[in-house]
Image: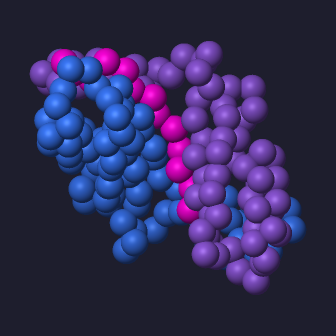
Chain colours: A blue, B purple
């Protein structure tokens, strides 16, 4: 079983990496790109868990380990 | 229009960040997590492009700017 976790800067938080990329793209002629947000993406391989346990463990891991709740938010999905 | 881009270390490349997280999780008691891979996730806001142009520009941007082709691979999707 696999879990996919996305961790993104909160909407209210500046994203300097994303801004830097947006400026670079603008300089390269990609003027259609108005905004860039950069986050993290995790693939977790889970062994021997029920789908419910995978769900609850991934939520705890996302909340306690992968995300800084002051500036980031997360979402996840469980895949068979 | 939006583009989502995932950039991941190639399967053949070691992922020290992912390994560190896996070890930390193991130490915290999450023994079901056998492997962790960490990548990057980008959300691009695109303005005034047709879907075809959004597709081709996002592919070029992913290839030329967001990905280091020696150690990383990417995939993307275009959203209305």
Q: Tell whether A60 sits left or right of B65.
A: left
| Residue A1 image-quadrant placement | top left
Pick the front one: A31 or B5: B5
| A21 versus A48 height, above or below | below
Q: Identify the main secondary structure in magenta.
A: strand
Vertical placement of B57 versus B38: above or below? below
Residue B26 position in % (x across, y down): 21, 19
Residue at screen point 68% across, 74% down:
B46
Q: Is residue A27 visible?
A: no
Q: Position of residue B37 (x, y in %)?
A: 45, 29
Residue A35 horizontal/vertical position (percent): 62, 72
In the image: residue A52, left or right of residue A11: left
Q: Is residue B75 visible?
A: yes
**Residue drawn at the location 76% of the way across and 68% of the way down:** B54
Instruction: Please say if A27 is above or below B18.
Output: below
Give the residue displayed 72% in from the left and 35% down from the top. Answer: B68
Is B38 contained in the magenta span? yes
| Residue lying farthest to the bottom in this orientation | B48
Q: Nearer the viewer, residue B61 or A13?
A: B61
Instruction: Give the residues in magenta.
Output: B31-43
Q: Is residue A39 magenta?
A: no
Residue drawn at x 14%, y 35% as measured from the top left: A53
């Amino acid at each position: 079983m696999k879990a996919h976790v996305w961790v993104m800067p909160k909407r209210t938080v500046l994203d300097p990496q994303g801004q830097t990329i947006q400026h670079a793209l603008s300089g390269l002629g990609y003027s259609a790109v108005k905004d860039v947000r950069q986050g993290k993406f995790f693939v977790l391989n889970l062994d021997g868990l029920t789908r419910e346990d995978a769900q609850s463990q991934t939520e705890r891991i996302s909340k306690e380990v992968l995300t800084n709740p002051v500036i980031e938010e997360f979402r996840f999905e469980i895949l068979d």
